[in-house]
Image: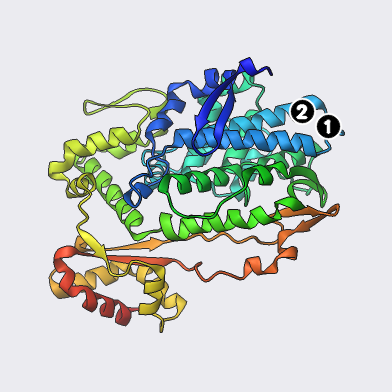
């Protein structure tokens, strides 16, 4: 493809990104994809005001890293036993999947995506299985648990962009599988070689170290300004290859990437421990959820079909829906901000979110402080703070004559990443090794794995802070 067939975009994270003009024409320059400009990448701007980046730039970044990955895999690997056209189709398909992997994200990204599952009546998986009725897709998807936004993104990709994918030489089922992380399987344990190869290419987007993670680690670090670890992308992706391994094919790294692999895990864990699960980030996400629920209650006023059931219905991506004089179509963050502004006089949570005048404060601000306060408790006892949150809140508020929402209990889930078994393969001296064979200690540092609850108390009840801490201690 000549240089004239590309469009060049400057990205502050990766530098100059080249995207085929055909991808821009058929995918990027469409209303559905451009919607991502108005979907915040994360909710961390409540902590870092500069962190106002979006799913649009992230998607372009993930595409860029997939392009680099594919180029290096083709250069470093031996695919002589496969037809050239097969390799090209798989290569194009994984790049398309990377570009479209977030196209169905909900407004406010992960903060509201659970409403997709609630208001599509548990049918997100069915939408996909209705498309791919032949083969093993219906059975294979039962073995995984995709996030709601992944299911919506996959469905929109192969419906709204169905013709475009065909014109770009893409494989719709493979693209769907790559987005939701659904590898090909077989009942008797045997698969055609081409499907084994597709599973290996799928790891570019869905694995312990994939281009989605790489982009958000770099992009969220850049946007926040946090002093996270650095990742040598050129060295890491330049080492990629696909090789035969244990009767299948796997994505592996050459030995020269060893120094970078650890940085990826450390960089991701840093973000989850100290940013994504920061007490301010979690609190604001909860306030947005409560504001949206109250908004729906105020607008719907007992109607059978609620505002939320309509705006989080997948149909809003296919046709304009009119709900009580409100037009719902391709919803984004700006739409919800507008709705909340109109509702703030009757919605205290909307007012709190828009003014960002937090009404409650955390009893402790870090996981370390939490451990110090309750060091004498066992892990299962500490878990009761979240599991028994309703009883704790009801008991304490009744004792002191408080309102129920004077106290909020939230769970921080660091989801710390650890390399296990054959998660990451490295080629050393012609031998394929599991990273844990080289660095067994990768499995051992799990001190931050436990979920940490954050308990918030109304500021005008601050005098009850120590008593609430003691009450929780006695209760659990």
Between 336 and 302, the residue placed more toward the observer is 336
Q: Which mark is residue 82?
A: 1
Specify few, some or many for label 2: CA neighbours under 10 Å numbering under 14, 14-19, or 20 or more: few
Q: How many numbered circles does the render carry?
A: 2
Residue 56 x %, y %: 46, 33
Q: Which residue is mark 2?
A: 86
**Quadrant placement of the C terminus:** bottom left
Residue at point 71%, 27% (across, down)? 89
Question: On screen, 169 above or below 140?
Answer: above
Label 1: state its secondary structure.
loop
Residue 43 x %, y %: 37, 47
Mark yes or no: residue 421 visible: yes
Residue at point 52%, 38% (across, down)? 126
Between 136 and 426, the residue placed more toward the observer is 426
Q: Which mark is residue 159?
A: none
Question: On screen, 410 above or below 75?
Answer: below
Residue 375 x %, y %: 41, 81
Mark yes or no: residue 132 visible: no
Residue at point 39%, 36% (across, down)? 39
Drawn side of residue 175 relative to residue 360, left or right:
right
Q: Disc 1 and disc 2: Cα gap in Å? A: 7 Å
């Amino acid at each position: 493809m000549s240089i004239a067939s590309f469009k060049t975009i400057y990205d502050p994270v990766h530098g100059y990104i080249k995207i085929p003009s055909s991808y821009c024409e058929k995918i990027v320059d469409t209303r559905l994809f451009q919607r991502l400009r108005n979907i915040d990448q994360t909710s961390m701007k409540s902590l870092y005001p500069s962190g106002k980046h979006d799913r649009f730039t992230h998607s372009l970044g993930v595409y860029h890293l997939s392009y680099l990955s594919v180029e290096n895999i083709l250069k470093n690997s031996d695919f002589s036993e496969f037809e050239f056209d097969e390799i090209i189709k798989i290569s194009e398909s994984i790049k398309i999947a990377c570009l479209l992997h977030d196209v169905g994200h909900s407004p406010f990204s992960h903060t509201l995506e659970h409403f997709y599952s609630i208001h599509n009546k548990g049918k997100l998986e069915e939408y996909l299985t209705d498309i791919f009725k032949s083969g093993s897709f219906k059975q294979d998807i039962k073995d995984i648990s995709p996030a709601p936004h992944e299911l919506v993104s996959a469905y929109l990709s192969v419906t709204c962009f169905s013709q475009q994918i065909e014109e770009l030489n893409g494989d719709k089922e493979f693209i769907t599988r790559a987005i939701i992380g659904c590898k090909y399987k077989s009942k008797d344990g045997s698969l055609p070689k081409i499907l084994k190869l597709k599973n290996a290419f799928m790891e570019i987007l869905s694995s312990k170290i994939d281009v989605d993670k790489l982009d958000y680690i770099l992009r969220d670090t850049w946007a926040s300004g946090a002093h996270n670890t650095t990742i040598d992308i050129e060295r890491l992706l330049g080492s990629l290859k696909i090789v035969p391994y244990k009767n299948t094919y796997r994505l592996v790294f050459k030995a020269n990437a060893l120094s970078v692999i650890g940085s990826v895990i450390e960089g991701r864990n840093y973000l989850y421990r100290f940013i994504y699960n920061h007490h301010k980030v979690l609190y604001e996400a909860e306030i947005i959820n409560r504001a949206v629920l109250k908004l729906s209650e105020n607008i719907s006023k007992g109607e059978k079909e609620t505002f939320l059931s309509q705006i989080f219905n997948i149909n809003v991506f296919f046709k304009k829906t009119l709900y009580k004089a409100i037009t719902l179509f391709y919803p984004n963050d700006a739409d919800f901000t507008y709705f909340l502004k109109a509702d703030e006089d009757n919605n205290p949570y909307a007012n709190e979110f828009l003014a960002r005048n937090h009404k409650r404060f955390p009893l402790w601000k870090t996981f370390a402080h939490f451990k110090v306060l309750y060091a004498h408790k066992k892990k299962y006892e500490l878990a009761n703070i979240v599991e028994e949150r309703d009883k704790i809140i009801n008991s304490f508020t009744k004792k002191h004559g408080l309102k129920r929402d004077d106290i909020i209990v939230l769970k921080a889930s660091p989801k710390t990443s650890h390399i296990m078994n054959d998660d990451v393969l490295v080629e050393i001296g012609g031998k394929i090794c599991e990273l844990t064979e080289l660095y067994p200690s990768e499995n051992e540092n799990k001190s931050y794995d436990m979920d940490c609850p954050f308990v918030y108390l109304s500021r005008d009840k601050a005098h009850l802070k120590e008593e609430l801490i003691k009450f929780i201690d006695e209760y659990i």
